Amino acid sequence: MLHIDVKYTQILGSQLRNFAKKNDYLWNYSCPVCGDSTKNPRKARGFIYQFKQDLLVKCHKCGYSTNLGNLIKFVNSTLYDQYVVERYKNGATRYNAHKDIEQYISVVSPVDTNNIYLEDSILDELDRIDELPETHPAVQYVAKRLIPKDKWNLLYFCAKFKRYTNSISFKFTKEDDEHPRLIIPYFNSFGKVFAYQGRAFGKEEPKYYTIKIDDTEEKIYGLDRLDYSRRIYVVEGPLDSLFLPNTVAVSGSSFDTPTVRQLLTNATLVMDNEPRSKDIVKQLAKYIDKGYSVCMYPDTVKEKDINEMILSGKTPDQILELINTNTFKGIEAKLRFTKWRKCES
Ligand SMILES: [Zn+2]
């Protein structure tokens, strides 16, 4: 039925705002269900994408997710009638809305977000770093840390962090001592923001605030851009993850989370290169026991994290090489670990 769905998507497209074809089986449009958006008419967060032999629909703003037929019905009931007849003629005996569409969506591979930048309405009032003038202090901060320019669209500037956070979920009883922060949004595979980190530009404490919007999601940064068929690097800091390909960040929490465990066979854990305290040694031993591939930097590496390595002149390729040649698992990791831990301080 795919060819019929494609045909009707094209017809329907003329009635959708900002309708654009992204690839053979992926279209983007402004969602008519939620209005997407009242503030910015250029926003387009509705997607039509392929699932098996059908096309499905998902809006990343309001969450409206259904099959193509229901969207056609919502926009144009006459067109819907034609669509049903045509599907019927082509052998569909029954055309119902998928009852358990969410179930389908959880098994379908994520919409290809590499080529489309997904936005969420909670980011509407923030300034995206790549859209600010180069003279802006936030842009200069990001540039100084040598964060690659093609990742600037993932970072935002917030002038009043506490007020902003309170507008989403009431976290601060007092909005005193306000200062701007760099916002690092955490997108799920569907481009919905489920958490964000607010990083201080200066010496303000704490250095990071992590605000969770959806408590059911794990605080893993970068899942929206992951290619599960390739090696996945798991680092600590979200900003560090921006320097390496196919990298997620656990943002300070344990590496051994349910999500990371699912990636186990394909993942390399890269802890920060911190002094070997009892705690770090214990954690690393645990990850090795659980079967993870872990990176153990040699003593010659002095920088404490990936951003520091970049700032000291290493290229992403050199860092990747360094990680890959110092990654071990199983028995090999245990042998290496025995030597490595001797430097315990
Ligand atoms: Zn919507």
Image (cartoon, rainbow, N blue to C red):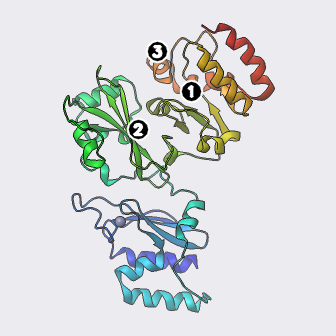
Q: Is residue 268 visible?
A: yes
Task: State which quarter of the image contains the N terminus.
Answer: bottom right
Q: Left or right of 12: which side holds 123? A: left
**Dots 1, 3 in contact, CB < 8 A:** no
Compared to residue 22, the image places residue 200 above or below, namely above
Residue 57: percent from left, percent from top = 46, 69
Marks 1 and 3, how far apart at CA? 14 Å
The dot on residue 151 is 2
**Dots 2, 1 in contact, CB < 8 A:** no
Residue nearest the observer in this picture, 116 or 271: 271
The dot on residue 288 is none
Compared to residue 55, the image places residue 153 above or below, namely above
Task: Determine whether the residue tagged by mark 1 lies in a helix, strand or loop.
Answer: helix
Residue 282: percent from left, percent from top = 65, 21
Compared to residue 99, the image places residue 200 above or below, namely above
Q: Left or right of 96: which side holds 39? A: left
Q: Quadrant of residue 195?
A: top left
Residue receiving disc 1 = 317
Task: State which quarter of the image contains the C terminus.
Answer: top right
Q: Earlier in the sequence, mark 2 or mark 1?
A: 2
Residue that appears at 32% across and 76% down: 15
Q: Which residue, as the protein is rendered here, is positioned at the far right? A: 331
Q: Earlier in the sequence, mark 3 or mark 2?
A: 2
Residue that appears at 31% across and 23% down: 205
